[in-house]
Image: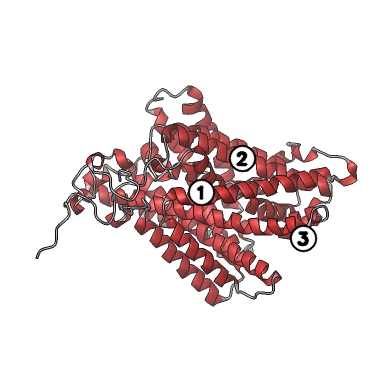
């Protein structure tokens, strides 16, 4: 007796599109702000900036960077109203600067976001190991990191709205403890009075501004994850625009106010020395004198969940970049398929998980210190790649609207994108020049120049691959960066001949995939 066969045009294992209409503005904001990991930045990065740079201008530096990225966001979200694609930067650059440069950008995006996510495992493992040690449990950092890896791997294959709910719970708790800590610090000012001198913009005109802005920009990396979720958002043309603006504003507000609150309770003249002494324990030291020990313990725990939330957000971003590239033929078509029940990008999620466990295993065997060599190095290297993408995207917005404003006003189409391109050019130049200092390597170290050169190399490889596609597969080349708007689907040859809009709904929740 022969088994009944399925309709050949119905996808039985995977589907072509990401899960539709699952994310509203709050969920998308959670992904963006979680990617920026405000509590991680406040406890880790801000303390380090005060200790290393020794400048009291950290609060105004975060305000300045929030302003630059707000300008960038104006053109960025204006373009998002005309392009709905989970490839985000890659897709936008393809539309604005051409397909060849777009594929080059994609080859920069993949290692950049992957390294950002893997680097965060080092911080998570180190923090979790320390917390467990306080309870008398000895666990090496890499075992804690692997435990987080397992949970992220599973959530990466589940419904994206489930991941969004997880992020929502963690982020609300995280922001709540930040607000409480800030209120406590401001309520106990040094010398009995509150000062706003650290918001004085004068230090931004000194030579230290380059290092300050570079380090502050790193605290925002992740907000752009909102656009990566455009295909899964409800009414994406409005949802993504609102969510991206909110993600930048919330991250900027939390970081700048927190940096200011630290100077209030120590006094601006004492913040650098205090930060150098206590480092990542700075905030807990400052509030621990005025709050119950339980609230400090909660802060340590939420610091851990903040890092986990960022791990989950970056995993989603990497997987969806690979999905966009697979769907359009830049990567093998396997990457352009999703799970029929969960709508998650299968191959991209699994690939990132495999890469992460390989790198973590290598670091575990090497015995290198996780915070410096896993977290600091990999996230800084990845952050440079994301900054390159922001800079190229700001140019792409200019190129896109130069061919027509598409009913956008002059501010959104021309002025804001041009200003953000100029300002990001300054920040990127400062980053490349001082990259060795950011990695804290010696002046003669090849890492002073190697990483920027490697990014140029992978971009050149991507551009070369696009040129090959243009000559060998022109019909697929034409689809690059076009997402679901592409007229030619590379998956039709694999048995998905039925148009997406004509497919019958399949999956547990009846969403059209």
Q: Please tell me whether mark 2 sits on a helix, a strand or a loop.
A: helix
Q: From the image, which quarter does the N terminus lie in?
A: bottom left
Dot 3 or dot 1, earlier in sequence: 1
Instruction: Name the residue carrying label 3.
Output: 278
Instruction: Name the residue carrying label 1.
Output: 165
- Of badges 3 and 1, nearer the viewer stands 1
Question: Residue 194 falls in which quadrant of the image?
Answer: top right
Other residues around mark 2 within 10 Å, as few (<14) / some (14–19) / many (≥20): some
Judge whether 513 appears above or below 281 on screen.
above
For this rendering, which residue is in front, 16 or 416?
16
For this rendering, which residue is in front, 513 or 367?
513
Between the C-alphas of marks 3 and 2, the distance is 27 Å
Other residues around mark 1 within 10 Å, as few (<14) / some (14–19) / many (≥20): some
Residue 150 x, y percent position in the rendering: 48, 65
Residue 446 x, y percent position in the rendering: 55, 64
Other residues around mark 3 within 10 Å, as few (<14) / some (14–19) / many (≥20): some
Farthest-out residue, left: 1
Q: Please tell me whether mark 3 sits on a helix, a strand or a loop.
A: helix
For this rendering, which residue is in front, 465 or 368?
368
- Of badges 2 and 1, nearer the viewer stands 1
Instruction: Name the residue carrying label 2.
Output: 250
């Amino acid at each position: 007796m022969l088994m009944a066969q399925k309709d050949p045009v119905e996808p039985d294992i995977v589907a072509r599109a990401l899960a539709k209409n699952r994310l509203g503005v709050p969920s998308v904001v959670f992904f963006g702000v979680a990617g920026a990991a405000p509590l991680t930045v406040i406890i880790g990065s801000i303390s380090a900036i005060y200790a290393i740079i020794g400048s009291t201008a950290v609060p105004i530096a975060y305000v300045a960077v929030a302003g630059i990225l707000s300008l960038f966001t104006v053109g960025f979200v204006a373009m998002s109203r005309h392009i709905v694609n989970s490839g985000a930067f890659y897709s936008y650059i393809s539309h604005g600067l051409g397909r060849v440069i777009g594929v080059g950008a994609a080859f920069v995006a993949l290692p950049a976001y992957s390294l950002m996510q893997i680097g965060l495992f080092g911080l998570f493992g180190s923090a979790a190991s320390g917390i467990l040690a306080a309870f008398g449990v000895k666990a090496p950092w890499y075992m804690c990191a692997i435990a987080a890896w397992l949970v992220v791997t599973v959530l990466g294959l589940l419904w994206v709205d489930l991941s969004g709910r997880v992020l929502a719970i963690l982020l609300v708790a995280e922001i709540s403890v930040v607000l409480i800590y800030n209120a406590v610090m401001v309520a106990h000012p040094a010398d009995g009075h509150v000062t706003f001198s650290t918001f004085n913009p004068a230090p931004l005109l000194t030579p230290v501004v380059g290092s300050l802005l570079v380090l502050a920009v790193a605290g925002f990396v992740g907000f752009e994850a909102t656009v990566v979720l455009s295909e899964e958002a409800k009414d994406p043309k409005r949802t993504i625009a609102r969510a991206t603006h909110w993600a930048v504003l919330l991250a900027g507000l939390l970081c700048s106010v927190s940096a200011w609150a630290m100077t209030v309770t120590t006094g601006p003249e004492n913040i650098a020395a205090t930060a150098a002494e206590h480092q990542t324990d700075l905030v807990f030291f400052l509030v621990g004198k005025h709050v119950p020990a339980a609230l400090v313990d909660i802060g340590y725990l939420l610091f851990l969940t903040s890092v986990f939330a960022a791990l989950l957000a970056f995993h989603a971003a990497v997987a969806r970049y690979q999905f966009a590239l697979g769907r359009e033929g830049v990567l093998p078509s396997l990457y352009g398929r999703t799970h029929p029940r969960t709508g998650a990008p299968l191959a991209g999620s699994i690939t990132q998980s495999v890469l992460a466990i390989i790198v973590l295993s290598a670091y575990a065997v090497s015995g290198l210190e996780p915070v410096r060599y896993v977290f600091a190095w990999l996230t800084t290297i990845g952050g440079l790649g994301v900054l390159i993408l922001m800079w190229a995207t700001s140019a792409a917005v200019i190129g896109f609207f130069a061919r027509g404003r598409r009913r956008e006003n002059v501010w959104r189409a021309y002025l804001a994108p041009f200003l953000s391109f100029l300002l990001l050019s300054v920040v990127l130049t400062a980053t490349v020049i001082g990259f060795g200092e950011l990695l804290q390597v010696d002046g003669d170290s090849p890492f002073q120049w190697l990483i920027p050169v490697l990014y140029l190399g992978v971009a050149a490889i991507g551009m070369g691959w696009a040129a090959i596609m243009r000559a060998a597969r022109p019909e697929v080349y034409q689809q690059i960066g076009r997402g679901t708007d592409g007229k030619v689907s590379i998956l039709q040859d694999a048995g998905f001949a039925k148009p997406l809009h004509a497919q019958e709904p399949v999956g547990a929740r009846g969403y059209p995939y």
